[in-house]
Image (cartoon, helix red, strand yellow):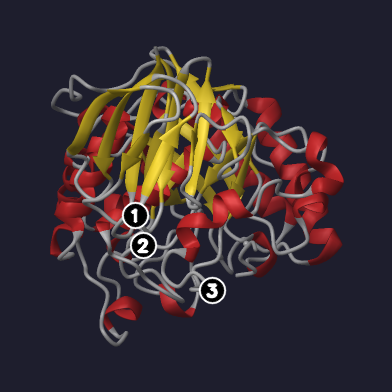
Amino acid sequence: MIKTALCVGFLLLAPVVVTGQAPSTTRGGPVRTQSRAVADAGGPFNALGATLFWGAWGYKFDRPRLDRNLEALNAAGVDYIRVLGSVGGDSWQDREVDPRWPDYEKVIAGVTDLAYDRYGMRVQWTLFGGAPFNTSTASRTSVVDRFAAMARGREHKLFAFEIANEAWQNGFDGPDGIAELRRLGKRLNDRTAVLVALSAPATGAICDTYAQSGVQAMTIHYARQFGDEGPKTPMLLPWMSLPLDKRCRNALPQVVLNNEPIGPESSVKQDDDPSRIAGAYVMTFLAGHAAYVLHMGPGIRGGGAADLAQTPPRSSEFTELPAFKSIATALAAARRYLPAGLANWTRHEPNAPGAPLQGFERLYTASSGSRFVALAVDVGKGATLRTRVAANITIRDAATGKVLQRQTVAAGEKIPLGGGSQLVVIGRGT
Protein backbone atom coordinates (compact mmCIF):
# COMPACT_ATOMS: atom_id res chain seq x y z
CA MET A 1 0.00 0.00 0.00
CA ILE A 2 1.43 3.35 -1.02
CA LYS A 3 1.34 6.29 1.37
CA THR A 4 -1.42 8.88 0.83
CA ALA A 5 0.36 11.58 2.73
CA LEU A 6 2.38 9.69 -1.48
CA CYS A 7 8.89 32.88 -17.53
CA VAL A 8 12.37 33.87 -16.68
CA GLY A 9 15.13 33.42 -19.22
CA PHE A 10 18.06 31.16 -18.49
CA LEU A 11 20.88 32.56 -16.37
CA LEU A 12 24.23 30.90 -16.90
CA LEU A 13 25.72 30.75 -13.41
CA ALA A 14 29.42 30.46 -12.72
CA PRO A 15 30.30 27.70 -10.25
CA VAL A 16 30.62 28.82 -6.64
CA VAL A 17 34.21 28.38 -5.47
CA VAL A 18 34.42 26.13 -2.44
CA THR A 19 37.64 25.75 -0.51
CA GLY A 20 38.97 22.31 0.34
CA GLN A 21 39.07 19.15 -1.72
CA ALA A 22 36.32 16.67 -2.36
CA PRO A 23 36.77 13.27 -0.68
CA SER A 24 38.68 10.72 -2.72
CA THR A 25 35.53 8.56 -2.86
CA THR A 26 33.52 11.19 -4.76
CA ARG A 27 31.68 9.64 -7.69
CA GLY A 28 32.12 11.34 -11.04
CA GLY A 29 30.14 11.95 -14.18
CA PRO A 30 26.42 12.64 -14.56
CA VAL A 31 23.90 10.22 -13.08
CA ARG A 32 21.99 8.29 -15.74
CA THR A 33 19.54 5.42 -15.88
CA GLN A 34 20.71 1.87 -16.56
CA SER A 35 17.51 -0.11 -16.90
CA ARG A 36 16.05 -0.05 -13.34
CA ALA A 37 19.33 1.08 -11.73
CA VAL A 38 21.25 4.35 -11.77
CA ALA A 39 24.83 4.68 -12.97
CA ASP A 40 27.54 7.29 -13.47
CA ALA A 41 31.13 7.33 -14.72
CA GLY A 42 31.96 4.62 -12.19
CA GLY A 43 29.17 2.34 -13.39
CA PRO A 44 25.94 1.32 -11.63
CA PHE A 45 25.60 1.92 -7.90
CA ASN A 46 23.07 1.28 -5.15
CA ALA A 47 22.38 4.90 -4.27
CA LEU A 48 21.99 5.97 -0.64
CA GLY A 49 20.43 9.38 -0.04
CA ALA A 50 19.52 11.34 3.07
CA THR A 51 16.85 13.94 3.76
CA LEU A 52 18.27 17.42 4.38
CA PHE A 53 15.22 19.53 3.58
CA TRP A 54 16.62 22.64 5.26
CA GLY A 55 19.90 22.66 3.32
CA ALA A 56 19.21 25.87 1.37
CA TRP A 57 18.10 27.71 4.52
CA GLY A 58 21.23 26.47 6.29
CA TYR A 59 23.48 27.65 3.47
CA LYS A 60 22.11 31.19 3.75
CA PHE A 61 21.59 31.53 7.49
CA ASP A 62 23.54 28.90 9.45
CA ARG A 63 26.53 27.60 7.49
CA PRO A 64 28.30 26.04 10.52
CA ARG A 65 25.23 23.90 11.26
CA LEU A 66 25.01 22.87 7.62
CA ASP A 67 28.69 21.95 7.50
CA ARG A 68 28.45 19.83 10.65
CA ASN A 69 25.54 17.86 9.26
CA LEU A 70 27.04 17.46 5.79
CA GLU A 71 30.19 16.14 7.44
CA ALA A 72 28.17 13.62 9.46
CA LEU A 73 26.32 12.38 6.37
CA ASN A 74 29.50 12.14 4.34
CA ALA A 75 31.14 10.10 7.11
CA ALA A 76 28.09 7.81 7.03
CA GLY A 77 28.69 7.06 3.34
CA VAL A 78 25.68 8.97 1.96
CA ASP A 79 25.76 9.49 -1.82
CA TYR A 80 23.33 12.39 -2.06
CA ILE A 81 21.12 14.71 -0.03
CA ARG A 82 17.49 15.62 -0.72
CA VAL A 83 16.97 19.40 -0.34
CA LEU A 84 13.86 21.56 -0.74
CA GLY A 85 14.18 24.32 -3.31
CA SER A 86 11.31 26.33 -1.84
CA VAL A 87 9.26 25.92 1.32
CA GLY A 88 7.21 28.06 3.70
CA GLY A 89 4.05 28.13 5.74
CA ASP A 90 3.11 27.84 9.39
CA SER A 91 5.57 25.15 10.48
CA TRP A 92 8.38 26.46 8.28
CA GLN A 93 8.47 30.13 9.23
CA ASP A 94 11.97 29.86 10.69
CA ARG A 95 13.26 27.57 7.92
CA GLU A 96 11.72 29.29 4.89
CA VAL A 97 13.38 29.02 1.47
CA ASP A 98 12.05 31.75 -0.82
CA PRO A 99 12.75 32.06 -4.58
CA ARG A 100 12.20 35.81 -4.16
CA TRP A 101 15.48 36.13 -2.30
CA PRO A 102 17.78 38.42 -4.34
CA ASP A 103 20.60 35.88 -3.94
CA TYR A 104 18.44 32.79 -4.62
CA GLU A 105 20.49 31.61 -7.61
CA LYS A 106 23.69 31.88 -5.57
CA VAL A 107 22.11 29.88 -2.72
CA ILE A 108 20.94 26.92 -4.80
CA ALA A 109 24.22 26.86 -6.72
CA GLY A 110 26.17 27.22 -3.47
CA VAL A 111 24.43 24.27 -1.79
CA THR A 112 25.11 22.10 -4.85
CA ASP A 113 28.79 23.09 -5.02
CA LEU A 114 29.38 22.80 -1.28
CA ALA A 115 27.82 19.33 -0.99
CA TYR A 116 29.78 17.93 -3.92
CA ASP A 117 33.08 19.83 -3.89
CA ARG A 118 33.76 19.59 -0.17
CA TYR A 119 31.76 16.57 0.96
CA GLY A 120 31.51 14.38 -2.14
CA MET A 121 27.71 14.20 -2.13
CA ARG A 122 25.32 15.04 -4.92
CA VAL A 123 22.01 16.86 -4.43
CA GLN A 124 18.47 15.82 -5.29
CA TRP A 125 16.55 19.08 -5.43
CA THR A 126 12.84 18.93 -4.70
CA LEU A 127 11.78 22.26 -6.19
CA PHE A 128 8.46 22.80 -4.43
CA GLY A 129 8.08 21.73 -0.82
CA GLY A 130 4.92 23.57 0.03
CA ALA A 131 5.51 27.28 -0.44
CA PRO A 132 2.73 29.89 -0.41
CA PHE A 133 4.80 32.26 -2.56
CA ASN A 134 4.80 29.81 -5.52
CA THR A 135 1.12 29.89 -6.41
CA SER A 136 1.04 31.13 -9.99
CA THR A 137 1.95 29.25 -13.13
CA ALA A 138 4.45 31.97 -14.01
CA SER A 139 6.23 31.80 -10.65
CA ARG A 140 6.49 28.01 -10.78
CA THR A 141 7.77 28.08 -14.34
CA SER A 142 10.37 30.64 -13.26
CA VAL A 143 11.63 28.36 -10.49
CA VAL A 144 11.93 25.43 -12.93
CA ASP A 145 13.90 27.56 -15.37
CA ARG A 146 16.24 28.83 -12.66
CA PHE A 147 17.09 25.29 -11.60
CA ALA A 148 17.66 24.28 -15.22
CA ALA A 149 20.09 27.19 -15.55
CA MET A 150 21.87 26.30 -12.30
CA ALA A 151 22.36 22.72 -13.49
CA ARG A 152 24.39 23.75 -16.54
CA GLY A 153 27.96 22.66 -15.91
CA ARG A 154 26.92 20.99 -12.65
CA GLU A 155 25.21 17.91 -14.07
CA HIS A 156 27.76 15.64 -12.32
CA LYS A 157 26.96 17.25 -8.96
CA LEU A 158 23.24 16.54 -9.12
CA PHE A 159 21.55 13.23 -8.41
CA ALA A 160 18.09 14.20 -9.63
CA PHE A 161 15.38 16.84 -9.71
CA GLU A 162 11.91 16.27 -8.27
CA ILE A 163 9.26 18.83 -9.13
CA ALA A 164 7.26 18.67 -5.89
CA ASN A 165 7.15 16.92 -2.54
CA GLU A 166 3.80 15.09 -2.26
CA ALA A 167 2.38 17.38 -4.91
CA TRP A 168 -1.30 16.77 -4.14
CA GLN A 169 -0.95 18.50 -0.74
CA ASN A 170 1.53 21.14 -1.82
CA GLY A 171 -0.35 23.09 -4.46
CA PHE A 172 -0.76 20.56 -7.29
CA ASP A 173 -4.04 18.92 -6.29
CA GLY A 174 -6.68 17.61 -8.66
CA PRO A 175 -6.48 16.99 -12.41
CA ASP A 176 -5.31 20.54 -13.15
CA GLY A 177 -2.53 20.22 -10.58
CA ILE A 178 -1.33 16.94 -12.05
CA ALA A 179 -1.42 18.46 -15.54
CA GLU A 180 0.76 21.35 -14.39
CA LEU A 181 3.10 18.98 -12.57
CA ARG A 182 3.56 16.98 -15.76
CA ARG A 183 4.07 20.14 -17.81
CA LEU A 184 6.76 21.44 -15.46
CA GLY A 185 8.44 18.03 -15.38
CA LYS A 186 8.61 17.90 -19.16
CA ARG A 187 9.88 21.47 -19.31
CA LEU A 188 12.71 20.68 -16.89
CA ASN A 189 13.46 17.33 -18.52
CA ASP A 190 13.77 19.06 -21.91
CA ARG A 191 16.27 21.58 -20.50
CA THR A 192 18.68 19.37 -18.57
CA ALA A 193 20.41 15.98 -18.71
CA VAL A 194 19.84 15.55 -14.95
CA LEU A 195 17.29 12.87 -14.02
CA VAL A 196 13.83 14.34 -13.45
CA ALA A 197 10.98 12.92 -11.34
CA LEU A 198 7.58 14.54 -10.78
CA SER A 199 6.45 13.73 -7.23
CA ALA A 200 5.51 10.84 -4.99
CA PRO A 201 1.91 10.27 -6.12
CA ALA A 202 -1.14 9.94 -3.93
CA THR A 203 -2.80 6.54 -3.61
CA GLY A 204 -4.34 5.53 -6.91
CA ALA A 205 -2.71 8.38 -8.84
CA ILE A 206 0.44 6.67 -10.14
CA CYS A 207 -0.85 6.28 -13.68
CA ASP A 208 -2.34 9.77 -13.83
CA THR A 209 0.90 11.25 -12.53
CA TYR A 210 3.58 9.27 -14.32
CA ALA A 211 2.22 7.26 -17.26
CA GLN A 212 3.91 8.48 -20.46
CA SER A 213 5.04 11.64 -18.67
CA GLY A 214 8.42 11.66 -20.43
CA VAL A 215 10.50 11.89 -17.24
CA GLN A 216 13.15 9.31 -16.38
CA ALA A 217 12.52 8.55 -12.70
CA MET A 218 9.65 8.08 -10.28
CA THR A 219 9.65 8.90 -6.55
CA ILE A 220 7.55 6.81 -4.15
CA HIS A 221 6.68 7.45 -0.50
CA TYR A 222 5.79 4.16 1.14
CA ALA A 223 3.53 4.26 4.19
CA ARG A 224 5.26 4.90 7.50
CA GLN A 225 2.76 2.74 9.36
CA PHE A 226 2.88 -0.59 11.19
CA GLY A 227 0.51 -3.13 9.64
CA ASP A 228 0.07 -6.85 10.20
CA GLU A 229 3.84 -7.27 10.27
CA GLY A 230 4.32 -4.61 12.96
CA PRO A 231 7.51 -2.53 12.61
CA LYS A 232 8.70 -4.84 9.82
CA THR A 233 5.86 -3.68 7.54
CA PRO A 234 7.63 -0.59 6.11
CA MET A 235 10.71 -2.69 5.30
CA LEU A 236 8.58 -5.11 3.24
CA LEU A 237 6.49 -2.55 1.33
CA PRO A 238 8.77 -2.09 -1.71
CA TRP A 239 8.45 -5.82 -2.40
CA MET A 240 4.80 -6.18 -1.39
CA SER A 241 3.74 -3.25 -3.59
CA LEU A 242 5.10 -4.68 -6.86
CA PRO A 243 4.07 -4.01 -9.52
CA LEU A 244 3.35 -0.43 -8.56
CA ASP A 245 0.34 -0.26 -10.87
CA LYS A 246 -0.62 -3.01 -13.32
CA ARG A 247 -2.89 -0.70 -15.34
CA CYS A 248 0.02 1.33 -16.76
CA ARG A 249 3.08 -0.72 -15.79
CA ASN A 250 4.78 -0.42 -19.19
CA ALA A 251 4.15 3.35 -19.38
CA LEU A 252 5.92 4.19 -16.10
CA PRO A 253 9.57 5.20 -15.64
CA GLN A 254 11.71 2.15 -14.88
CA VAL A 255 13.82 3.94 -12.27
CA VAL A 256 12.07 4.19 -8.88
CA LEU A 257 13.45 6.09 -5.88
CA ASN A 258 12.39 4.99 -2.38
CA ASN A 259 12.24 8.63 -1.45
CA GLU A 260 10.95 9.08 2.10
CA PRO A 261 10.68 5.79 4.03
CA ILE A 262 10.36 5.33 7.77
CA GLY A 263 13.40 6.30 9.83
CA PRO A 264 14.50 7.73 13.17
CA GLU A 265 12.11 10.51 14.27
CA SER A 266 10.06 10.36 11.07
CA SER A 267 6.41 11.44 11.21
CA VAL A 268 3.43 9.07 11.61
CA LYS A 269 5.68 6.24 12.84
CA GLN A 270 9.43 6.13 13.42
CA ASP A 271 12.01 3.35 13.48
CA ASP A 272 15.61 3.55 14.64
CA ASP A 273 16.44 -0.16 14.57
CA PRO A 274 19.68 -0.65 12.56
CA SER A 275 18.68 -4.14 11.45
CA ARG A 276 15.38 -2.98 9.97
CA ILE A 277 16.83 0.21 8.45
CA ALA A 278 19.67 -1.69 6.77
CA GLY A 279 17.17 -4.38 5.80
CA ALA A 280 15.00 -1.71 4.15
CA TYR A 281 18.02 -0.47 2.18
CA VAL A 282 18.73 -4.01 0.93
CA MET A 283 15.05 -4.68 0.21
CA THR A 284 14.82 -1.49 -1.86
CA PHE A 285 17.26 -2.88 -4.44
CA LEU A 286 15.99 -6.46 -4.28
CA ALA A 287 12.60 -5.03 -5.22
CA GLY A 288 14.13 -3.36 -8.27
CA HIS A 289 14.32 0.22 -7.00
CA ALA A 290 17.34 2.42 -7.71
CA ALA A 291 17.81 4.46 -4.53
CA TYR A 292 16.99 4.56 -0.83
CA VAL A 293 16.72 7.80 1.18
CA LEU A 294 17.57 7.72 4.88
CA HIS A 295 14.77 9.88 6.32
CA MET A 296 15.63 11.13 9.82
CA GLY A 297 14.30 13.85 12.12
CA PRO A 298 17.32 16.17 11.96
CA GLY A 299 16.98 16.27 8.19
CA ILE A 300 13.48 17.80 8.32
CA ARG A 301 14.05 21.28 9.79
CA GLY A 302 17.43 20.92 11.50
CA GLY A 303 16.36 22.35 14.86
CA GLY A 304 13.43 24.41 13.63
CA ALA A 305 10.84 25.55 16.15
CA ALA A 306 8.13 23.19 14.86
CA ASP A 307 10.39 20.19 15.44
CA LEU A 308 11.57 21.31 18.86
CA ALA A 309 7.93 21.80 19.91
CA GLN A 310 7.09 18.16 19.28
CA THR A 311 6.82 15.64 22.13
CA PRO A 312 9.45 14.36 22.24
CA PRO A 313 11.30 17.02 20.22
CA ARG A 314 13.17 16.02 17.11
CA SER A 315 16.94 16.07 17.28
CA SER A 316 18.60 19.15 15.77
CA GLU A 317 21.64 17.39 14.33
CA PHE A 318 22.35 13.89 13.06
CA THR A 319 25.04 13.24 15.63
CA GLU A 320 22.46 13.82 18.40
CA LEU A 321 20.45 10.77 17.29
CA PRO A 322 21.28 7.88 19.65
CA ALA A 323 21.06 5.32 16.82
CA PHE A 324 22.77 7.37 14.12
CA LYS A 325 26.20 5.81 14.50
CA SER A 326 24.91 2.22 14.48
CA ILE A 327 22.59 2.89 11.52
CA ALA A 328 25.43 4.56 9.61
CA THR A 329 27.67 1.55 10.30
CA ALA A 330 25.04 -0.90 9.05
CA LEU A 331 24.33 1.10 5.87
CA ALA A 332 28.01 1.71 5.10
CA ALA A 333 28.61 -2.02 5.30
CA ALA A 334 25.63 -2.76 3.04
CA ARG A 335 26.92 -0.30 0.44
CA ARG A 336 30.16 -2.28 0.36
CA TYR A 337 28.83 -5.83 0.25
CA LEU A 338 25.83 -5.44 -2.07
CA PRO A 339 26.64 -6.03 -5.76
CA ALA A 340 26.38 -2.89 -7.88
CA GLY A 341 23.27 -2.61 -10.03
CA LEU A 342 21.27 -5.01 -7.86
CA ALA A 343 18.05 -3.30 -8.99
CA ASN A 344 18.45 -4.94 -12.41
CA TRP A 345 18.61 -8.51 -11.12
CA THR A 346 15.72 -10.98 -11.46
CA ARG A 347 13.41 -11.09 -8.44
CA HIS A 348 12.22 -14.39 -6.88
CA GLU A 349 9.31 -14.69 -4.50
CA PRO A 350 9.96 -16.72 -1.32
CA ASN A 351 10.15 -20.45 -2.16
CA ALA A 352 9.45 -19.84 -5.86
CA PRO A 353 10.46 -22.90 -7.96
CA GLY A 354 13.29 -21.06 -9.71
CA ALA A 355 14.68 -19.31 -6.63
CA PRO A 356 18.30 -20.31 -5.85
CA LEU A 357 17.51 -20.37 -2.10
CA GLN A 358 14.43 -21.98 -0.59
CA GLY A 359 12.99 -23.37 2.62
CA PHE A 360 12.51 -20.10 4.54
CA GLU A 361 9.19 -18.34 4.08
CA ARG A 362 10.55 -14.82 4.55
CA LEU A 363 13.43 -15.01 2.11
CA TYR A 364 13.37 -12.34 -0.63
CA THR A 365 15.84 -13.07 -3.41
CA ALA A 366 17.26 -11.62 -6.61
CA SER A 367 19.66 -13.35 -8.99
CA SER A 368 21.87 -12.62 -11.98
CA GLY A 369 23.39 -15.63 -13.70
CA SER A 370 25.00 -17.74 -10.98
CA ARG A 371 24.99 -14.89 -8.44
CA PHE A 372 22.24 -14.25 -5.90
CA VAL A 373 21.40 -11.98 -2.98
CA ALA A 374 18.64 -12.59 -0.44
CA LEU A 375 17.22 -10.89 2.62
CA ALA A 376 15.95 -13.19 5.38
CA VAL A 377 13.43 -11.27 7.49
CA ASP A 378 12.58 -11.92 11.13
CA VAL A 379 14.89 -14.89 11.53
CA GLY A 380 14.03 -16.94 14.59
CA LYS A 381 15.62 -19.81 16.44
CA GLY A 382 15.84 -23.00 14.40
CA ALA A 383 15.34 -21.32 11.03
CA THR A 384 17.04 -22.95 8.04
CA LEU A 385 17.28 -22.51 4.30
CA ARG A 386 18.47 -24.81 1.56
CA THR A 387 20.23 -24.16 -1.71
CA ARG A 388 18.88 -25.35 -5.03
CA VAL A 389 22.41 -25.20 -6.49
CA ALA A 390 25.93 -25.81 -5.23
CA ALA A 391 27.28 -22.44 -4.15
CA ASN A 392 29.72 -20.39 -2.12
CA ILE A 393 27.65 -18.50 0.46
CA THR A 394 28.26 -15.63 2.85
CA ILE A 395 25.68 -14.71 5.50
CA ARG A 396 25.83 -11.30 7.18
CA ASP A 397 23.98 -9.67 10.05
CA ALA A 398 22.13 -6.69 8.54
CA ALA A 399 22.44 -4.75 11.82
CA THR A 400 26.23 -4.67 11.70
CA GLY A 401 27.31 -6.00 8.31
CA LYS A 402 29.47 -8.60 10.06
CA VAL A 403 29.97 -12.02 8.50
CA LEU A 404 28.23 -14.75 10.50
CA GLN A 405 28.85 -17.68 8.15
CA ARG A 406 30.97 -18.32 5.08
CA GLN A 407 30.85 -21.75 3.48
CA THR A 408 30.60 -23.85 0.34
CA VAL A 409 27.40 -25.89 0.14
CA ALA A 410 26.06 -28.64 -2.11
CA ALA A 411 22.72 -28.48 -3.93
CA GLY A 412 19.89 -29.28 -1.52
CA GLU A 413 22.04 -28.78 1.57
CA LYS A 414 20.34 -27.20 4.59
CA ILE A 415 21.93 -24.13 6.15
CA PRO A 416 21.04 -23.05 9.69
CA LEU A 417 20.22 -19.37 10.16
CA GLY A 418 20.78 -17.37 13.29
CA GLY A 419 22.59 -14.45 14.83
CA GLY A 420 20.36 -11.57 13.74
CA SER A 421 16.77 -10.51 13.07
CA GLN A 422 17.53 -9.66 9.43
CA LEU A 423 20.22 -11.58 7.57
CA VAL A 424 21.70 -10.91 4.14
CA VAL A 425 22.72 -13.97 2.12
CA ILE A 426 25.12 -13.47 -0.78
CA GLY A 427 26.21 -16.35 -2.98
CA ARG A 428 27.54 -17.58 -6.26
CA GLY A 429 26.90 -20.98 -7.82
CA THR A 430 29.91 -23.25 -8.25
Q: Mark 1 or mark 3: which comes first in sequence?
A: 3
Does the CB distance between marks 1 and 3 fall below 8 Å? no
Residue displayed at 45% across by 73% down: 230
Front position in the image: 18 or 311: 311
Disc 1: which residue: 277
Q: Secondary structure at mark 2?
A: loop
In the rendered image, which quarter is residue 228 located in? bottom right
Q: For mark 1, does the 10 Å Cα neighbourhood hold few (<14), some (14 to 19), or many (20 or more) residues?
A: many
**Quadrant location of the N terminus in the rendered image:** bottom right
The answer to whether one can see residue 30 in this image is no
Mark 1–mark 2 distance (CA, rounded to whole Å): 7 Å
Q: Mark 1 or mark 2: which comes first in sequence?
A: 2
Disc 2: which residue: 263
Residue displayed at 46% across by 48% down: 360
Looking at the image, residue 126 lies above or below residue 429: below
Provide residue 95's location: percent of width, then percent of height. Answer: 36, 66
- Image-based side of 170 in relation to 19, left or right: right
Tell me which amino acid carries mark 2: Gly
- Image-based side of 161 in relation to 136, left or right: left
Q: Secondary structure at mark 1?
A: helix
- Select label 1 or label 2 by which is in front: 1
Provide residue 219's location: percent of width, then percent of height. Answer: 59, 47
In the rendered image, which quarter is residue 299 located in? bottom left
- Select label 3 or label 2 by which is in front: 3
Does the CB distance between marks 1 and 2 fall below 8 Å? yes
Q: For mark 3, does the 10 Å Cα neighbourhood hold few (<14), some (14 to 19), or many (20 or more) residues?
A: few
Q: For mark 2, does the 10 Å Cα neighbourhood hold few (<14), some (14 to 19), or many (20 or more) residues?
A: many
Looking at the image, residue 117 lies above or below residue 284: above
Q: Secondary structure at mark 3?
A: loop
